[in-house]
Image: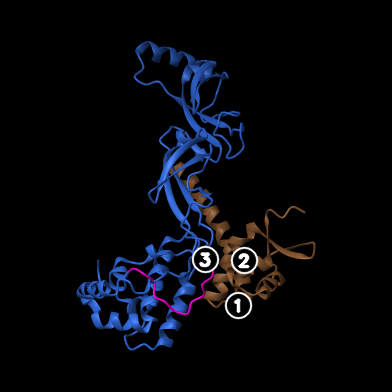
């Protein structure tokens, strides 16, 4: 299997100095997806940005996993609302310019 | 450089214990952390301030120095410079990542002058974090984003050549991977986020990839029909006006709108609304003919 876009969990955890249990716990909350191939556990590299956020929330802001789960759902809503606001602002501007 | 009251930033008194400071900092960090306040510049600034305040007040040595010199920190600067001269070859302070994505430049001039520009040392995690994400705003005219083109930008004294895709929206943010700040402790570079501010000085109103325009029509053309030339964003086109066209009639010019973002060769539509202009300053002859016409109905 092509592992170009994957990073082994072991490597990730060593790099970010977090225990592997942290990643498995995130998986239980469906906050991260783990890919298993040849008995090796991997993360998709496109998840790294979100994982870094979760590491900061947990280790720097002392937010537990339930909190991270709730925050992520709310952040998704915030992003969706911000995108809607942007679209509506553009629409409004185009009418105001008339 | 103005004096910064780190105690008031954290909302604690000068008598606050280490525990009080830690508690106040954590509470404010949870409130203003950029991860929890996406695209909120105000929160980001506030977070930098509380981070800086915590760096000073949570470190007993720095706190003492801050308390001793207080608002006379400018004298402290001279004093510290002399002191640093003596210790020139002493250990070099290194910046270690706290909240990933924040660099030394995130500290105020006041902090740099008073504490030598380096972040306080402490028992922090030394994980490798991505570098700071940079944000830039690029102002363009609507016509500029009608076609994809390359443009060179200068971000933090570095020239970056980027492709601006046709059809980019006002307020849209695109990510240029790896062009942000350097990674902390060997982590990957951050990304550059460019927000587009699109000025529309054209006669067209834009809604996504569709364009809207109003075209004036004289009463005779509206009544009898005929051919007119209308402006599109990409030149002029000839349009046939049907006889007895009513005021406010809307016609769609398929594919004459704006390019669809990242869909090469696909365009939105142009909607033209006719505004029928009544003749003014009628001559005696015209009045007579209109009167005659009115009698026929």
Q: Which mark is residue A73?
A: 2
Residue matched to label 3: B35
Q: Nearer the viewer, mark 3 or mark 2?
A: 3
Q: Which numbered disc, 2 or 1, marks the residue that appears first in the sequence?
A: 1
* B237 in the magenta segment: no
B228 or B27, nearer to the observer: B27
B262 or A45, nearer to the observer: A45
Protein chain holding label 1 = A
Protein chain holding label 3 = B
Q: Residue at x 44, y 32 (%)?
A: B203
Q: CA distance from mark 3 to mark 2?
A: 13 Å
Q: Residues within 10 Å of mark 1 (few under 14, many from 20)?
A: few
Q: CA distance from mark 2 to mark 1?
A: 15 Å
* Number of numbered callouts drawn: 3
Looking at the rendered structure, the secondary structure element under dot 1 is loop
- Badge 1 vs badge 3, beta-carbon distance below 8 Å: no
In the image, residue B273 sits, relative to residue A70, either above or below, namely: above
Q: Residue at x 74, y 52 (%)?
A: A2
Q: Which chain is blue?
A: B
Looking at the rendered structure, the secondary structure element under dot 3 is helix
Residue matched to label 1: A64
Q: Which chain is brown?
A: A
The image shows residue B250 at horizontal and vertical percentages of 56, 30
The image shows residue B165 at horizontal and vertical percentages of 53, 39
In the image, residue B271 sits, relative to residue B63, either above or below, namely: above
Which residues lie in the magenta part? B117-129
């Amino acid at each position: 299997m092509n592992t170009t876009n994957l990073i082994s969990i072991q490597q990730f955890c060593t790099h970010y100095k977090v225990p592997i249990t942290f990643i498995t716990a995130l998986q239980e909350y469906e906050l991260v997806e783990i890919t298993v191939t040849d008995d090796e556990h991997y993360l998709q590299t496109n998840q790294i940005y979100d994982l870094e956020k979760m590491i900061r929330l947990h280790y720097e802001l002392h937010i537990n996993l339930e909190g991270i789960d709730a925050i992520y759902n709310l952040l998704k809503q915030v992003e969706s609302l911000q995108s809607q606001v942007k679209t509506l602002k553009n629409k409004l501007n185009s009418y105001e310019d008339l | 450089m103005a004096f910064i009251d780190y105690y008031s930033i954290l909302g604690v008194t000068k008598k606050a214990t280490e525990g009080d400071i830690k508690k106040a900092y954590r509470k404010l960090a949870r409130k203003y952390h950029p991860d929890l306040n996406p695209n909120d510049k105000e929160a980001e600034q506030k977070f930098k301030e509380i981070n800086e305040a915590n760096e000073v007040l949570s470190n007993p040595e720095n706190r003492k120095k801050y308390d001793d010199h207080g608002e006379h920190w400018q004298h402290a600067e001279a004093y510290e410079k002399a002191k640093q001269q003596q210790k020139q070859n002493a250990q070099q302070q290194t910046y270690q990542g706290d909240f990933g994505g924040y660099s030394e430049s995130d500290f105020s001039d006041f902090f740099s002058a008073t504490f030598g520009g380096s972040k306080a040392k402490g028992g922090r995690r030394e994980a490798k974090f991505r570098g700071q994400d940079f944000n830039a705003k690029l102002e363009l005219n609507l016509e500029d984003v009608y076609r994809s083109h390359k443009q060179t930008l200068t971000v933090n004294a570095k020239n970056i050549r980027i492709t601006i895709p046709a059809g980019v929206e006002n307020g849209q943010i695109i990510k240029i991977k790896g062009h942000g700040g350097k990674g902390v402790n060997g982590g990957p570079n951050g990304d550059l986020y460019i927000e587009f501010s699109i000025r529309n000085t054209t006669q067209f109103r834009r809604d996504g990839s569709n364009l809207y325009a109003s075209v004036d029509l004289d009463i005779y053309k509206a009544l009898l029909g005929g051919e007119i030339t209308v402006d599109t964003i990409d030149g002029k086109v000839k349009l046939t006006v049907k006889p007895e066209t009513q005021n406010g009639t809307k016609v769609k010019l398929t594919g004459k709108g704006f390019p669809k973002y990242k869909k090469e060769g696909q365009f939105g539509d142009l909607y033209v609304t006719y505004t029928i202009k009544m003749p003014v300053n009628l001559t005696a002859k015209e009045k007579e003919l209109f009167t005659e016409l009115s009698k026929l109905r």
